Amino acid sequence: MDNSADSNKKQAIRVSNLTKEFNGFKAIDNISFSVEEGEIFGMLGPNGAGKTTTIRILSTTLKATKGEAFVWGYDISKQPDKIRRSIGIVFQDQTLDDRLTGMENLDFHARLYGMKRNLREKRIKEVLHLVDLWDKRNTLVKYYSGGMCRRLEIARGLMHYPRVLFLDEPTLGLDAQTRHNIWEHIRVLNKREKIAILLTTHYMDEADTLCNRVGIIDKGKILIIDEPEKLKNMVGKDLISIKVSSPEKMMQILSNFEWVSNKRVYDGLLHLEVTEGEKRIPFLINLAQRYSLSVDLVSLRRPTLEDVFLHFTGKRIREEEGTLRERISARIRSRRRR
């Protein structure tokens, strides 16, 4: 990023040594980070890592145990009303009224913020065009698809001209095509509205595609923050995955080779971080055969954010997309039957 350009931007969010405890359990543990005006900042981590707790504290719906935070310059502990007028938020769970039309949902939200009629009508048209729902403005929300509901919730979060938008797992439970459509809408609104976005996700591709910077969070701690490409370059090495008859034995055999910097076994495969990966594959196959180990598969690739997460935490994010999608679909069906 261009540091000279960033120096002229306002800090949209500043968090210092923030901690939240529940009966002695630290949901977030001494975290610090900042988000610049116009930036999309991603918090990447598994369910239960502390992402939603962080958003709840920054949006003033939950009090921190200790530490401090400022949103658009306002102190979360002293100026909650000013913060609430400066932010928009899209929660994990759908909170639309499906007995109202898309336009009526937005109009109701705008009235809560005291927006005058002329401004409400102008803004409703703007945000519905922004998320491609103008043609569906008079349709009851109970007839919207999951992706349409998500887009309407994003539009609602923008109604009162917030300077900071919180998106908590914005594509959770959606199919791949709908997720990509939502990403495009997020990119467009970030560019047009020049709005700072704090996005939480456990989808690696979402963080990689959307975010200017990513903070990897696990067990309440932020482990590293940087641009996605720089994070991947930290892993740096080529990544070789081998399906071998005894991955544990193969890992022992490789313990004295300096060009192997990291070794892990998961999903029945041995995963290696190596230098000059293409040159190492024939050697690895011959080495396995020398020790009477059969090799069924070898693959070589460059690092991804999944590998970065594995590098810093020693584990992978278990996305369990099917289970999550079924749970959310059940909620939507239940609401539509009411």
Image (cartoon, helix red, strand yellow):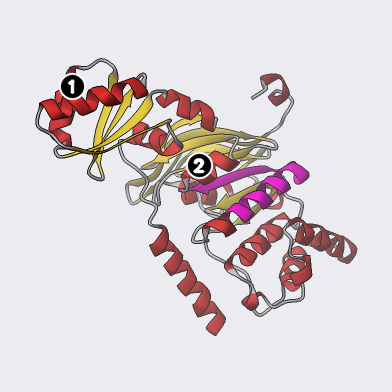
Q: Residue furthest left?
A: 292
Q: Is residue 190 magenta?
A: yes
Q: From mark 1 to mark 2, how far is it between C-alphas?
A: 34 Å
Task: Characterize the local packing of mark 1: few (<14), some (14-19) or many (20 or more) Cα atoms within 10 angstroms.
Answer: few
Residue sitting nearer the eye, 236 or 279: 279
Image spot of residue 80 (x, y percent): 63, 49
Can you see residue 15? Answer: no
Residue ID at (61%, 62%): 150
Classify mark 2: helix, strand or loop. strand
Q: Which mark is residue 53?
A: none
Q: Amino acid at mark 2?
A: Met
Which residues fall within the magenta stretch?
180-202
Tell me the chief SS of the magenta region: helix
Read off the residue under disc 1.
255
The quadrant of the rendering that contains the N terminus is: top right
Can you identify the residue that label 2 sits on?
43
Task: Pick whichever, 197 or 21, lies toward us.
Answer: 197
Residue 223 percent coordinates (x, y): 41, 32
Q: Viewed as shown, does residue 203 lie left or right of 196?
A: left
124 horizontally vs 286: left or right: right
Say what amino acid the circle numbered 1 marks: Ser
Q: Is residue 207 above or below residue 333?
A: above
User: Residue shown at 68%/40% (left/top)?
Assistant: 72
The correct choice, above or below, for 290 with respect to 45 in the image is above
